[in-house]
Image (spheres, rainbow, N blue to C red):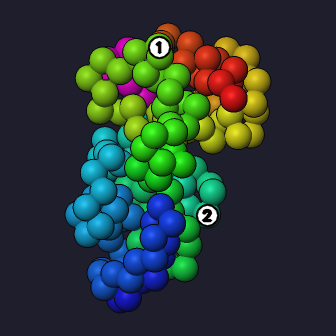
Amino acid sequence: MKINLTINNQEKVVDIDPDMPLLWLIRDVVKLKGTKFGCGMALCGACSLYVDGELVRSCSYPAKMADGKRITTIEGLSENESHLHPVQQAWLDIQVPQCGYCQPGFIMAAAKLLEQNPNPSVEDIKNGITNICRCGTHPRIIKAIIHASKIK
């Protein structure tokens, strides 16, 4: 099936199995490796990206549902390489990652949270971010999200 979509502001037409998860379209067909495979069951959030501005766990999102939609991956979150998104900058400033594998999904979820709630409390962050980090960097993640809320 031919699928037309816009990924990080670039028009793409791909001919793939319509039931392929969007994650594999992004990673294996389009070759954007920032979005990660974690659990494959939409539980951990490592595969988080935006479809038409909504946060989606792409491991369980069929590619056919992305037809005609705008996809934003971690590679497309910032305006350009010289101007990071505030959440990306906060991740660097606070030195959040340990292994770093889950961090793209956390960054996407944090950016969406801040878009919806520009000044979240610690409780808002704990309730709004359901991604999982096996390294246990959650305290630094919370600190970085609060820091990002102050970056303009």
* The C terminus, quarter of image: top right
In magenta, the rendered stretch is 130-137
Q: Where residue 96 appears, x then y in whole percent?
A: 41, 18
- What secondary structure is the stretch in magenta mostly built from? loop
Asked if 77 appears above or below 140 in the picture, the reply is below
Which residue is located at x 56 percent, y 73 percent?
69
Residue 146 lies in quadrant: top right
Task: Give the residue pinned by disc 1.
Answer: 94
Which residue does the image show at 45% across and 40% down from the upper left? 82
Task: Give the label, 1 or 2, closer to the camera.
Answer: 1
Disc 2 secondary structure class: loop
Q: Is residue 106 above or below residue 94?
A: below
The answer for how far apart the CA atoms under marks 1 and 2 are is 29 Å
Q: Tag 2: Cα neighbours inside 10 Å, few (<14), some, or many (≥20)?
A: some
Tell me, yes or no, whether the highlighted magenta stretch contains residue 58.
no
Q: Which residue is mark 2?
A: 52
Question: Would residue 147 be visible to someone looking at this image?
Answer: yes
